[in-house]
Amino acid sequence: MKLIGIHLLLILGMICPTLQGQGVSFRKMPAGWSANTPRKEISPDFEYNLRGGPDGLGSFVISTDHRSGSFGWFQKSFAVEGGEYFEFTALQRTRNLKHARRTAVTRVLWRDANGNHVKHDFTSDASYARGTQPQAEPEFPAIVQELENGWSLIKGTYLVPSAATQGIVELSYRWEARGKVEWAQVDLRKTTAPPARKVKLATVHFKPVSGDSNLEKCQLFEPLIAKAAEQGANIVVLPECLTYYGRGLKYHECAEAIPGESTEYFAELAKKYDLYICAGLLERDGRLVYNTAALVGPEGFVGKYRKVTLPRGEIEEGITPGTEYPVFDTSFGKVGMMICYDGFFPEVARKLSQNGAEVICWPVWGCNPMLGAARACENHVFVISSTYCGIELDWMITGVYGRDGKVLGQAQEFGEVVVSEVDLAKPLIWSSLGDFKAQLRSHTPVVPSEE
């Protein structure tokens, strides 16, 4: 679709202190910037505010009237060096938006000296193995910090494709009526390469058959945790309801406070072996019982997740569903948790991903392994599963799923520990999509709960 640049208005705007028309108002627009829209009939209102921004040095403003469907963007080409790292930064503030994540969208496009598309120098998808090098698709810098002054910091660091000489920055407004977005301090400049974030993700394939108490069940896992630590694991995932397995008791008879005895024990092991542990337990909170995953680390108890989706058996025995999707900061990255039946539904992993999870721990009694691949692939997150299913069942696996859904490591026998090393800093590049993970925030559909 041919884009309509309002370049004439920009030129005139440089001459006249204020010029209005075609839905555009400019006061001494900075050099190199233009305002664009696919069609005049859906153009929003553009303005450059000389005294805008938190520092009062100017801001780019797009707003709309009562009509929905308006779409337009400010644009500037920045000189870049192929093969080098460049960092994009900007401040953004929104007004009267119901869905800011979809309405206020920033992109960086790589082009050669003639304005043509360029190819990526690297990729991690299957097309590269077949000899196809994907086109460098737009980058989507993310909001990394909400500032106290009402502005948000947008930031992204990228390896510029070797054939690129310009990075085209777009500040766009999409679709909502009666809204406003303002950007300030926009820049794209050379920087140093970000450090790798290599992490070893571990899981255990084990049935805790013996043990007559919660603590005794937990103690069965120390040798496996020790094996994971010997291989340099940063985090190890244990199975679901591990204090309940094989005891012939009701769920509520194995329930305990969290944090409590079991998490205190696992926290001691986490400190001893210098890693994080995700354990599937049963939690009592007053008269309610939850199927819970607990996360502990060298620093102690980190947090818990209460299973949101419950299968028939748990409902019938009085388990209460959770309602939240917490994500926790660890020394190596952001970790979310889901449990067993959660894997049958895309909403749980998607909410965890939206909340920032880079790794999802998944204690899982049994599930279709293809759903584990789907949850990893559709969210571009690493998923670590620990199950009671043997491989002879051709059902759920104990393993580590990559962000493309492929299994990086899988246990074959009970008593086995699987460890896979990944790099959380390395983007997964797909043909025709680029870094899909970065686009999820702005492209995920609005659900009724967001209305």
Image (cartoon, helix red, strand yellow):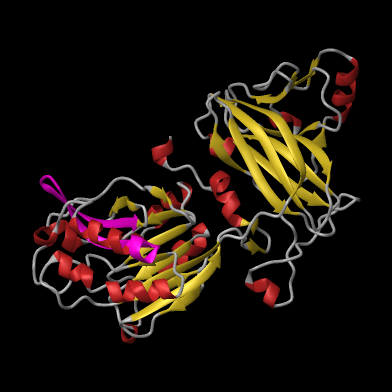
Q: Left or right: 397 with respect to 102?
A: left
For the residue pair 356 and 40, the one nearer the viewer reads as 356
For the residue pair 421 and 6, the one nearer the viewer reads as 421
| Residue 230 in view | yes
For the residue pair 147 and 270, the one nearer the viewer reads as 270
| Residue 175 in view | no
Q: Left or right: 249 with respect to 220?
A: left
Q: Where is residue 212 in the image (x, y as percent from the top left)?
A: 10, 71
Q: Position of residue 146 (x, y in %)?
A: 53, 33
User: In the displayed structure, would residue 11 be above or below residue 134?
Assistant: above
**Residue in the picture at 60% in, 58% down:** 425
**Residue in the picture at 59% in, 35% down:** 103
**Residue in the picture at 45% in, 68% down:** 201
Residue found at the far front of this picture: 272
Q: Left or right: 229 with respect to 130?
A: left
Q: Position of residue 122 (x, y in %)?
A: 72, 66
Q: In which quarter of the image is residue 142?
A: top right
Name the quarter where the C terminus is drawn: top left
**Residue in the picture at 60% in, 27% down:** 93
User: In the displayed structure, would residue 265 be above or below residue 5?
Assistant: below
**Is residue 62 highlighted in magenta?**
no
- Dominant secondary structure of the residues highlighted in magenta in the image: strand
Q: Where is residue 174 in the image (x, y as percent from the top left)?
A: 63, 35
User: In the displayed structure, would residue 152 be above or below residue 442?
Assistant: above
For the residue pair 409 and 77, the one nearer the viewer reads as 409
Residue interval drawn in magenta: 270-296
User: In the displayed structure, would residue 247 be above or below residue 426?
Assistant: below
Q: In which quarter of the image is residue 219?
A: bottom left
Q: Left or right: 260 with respect to 300?
A: left
**Is residue 277 highlighted in magenta?**
yes
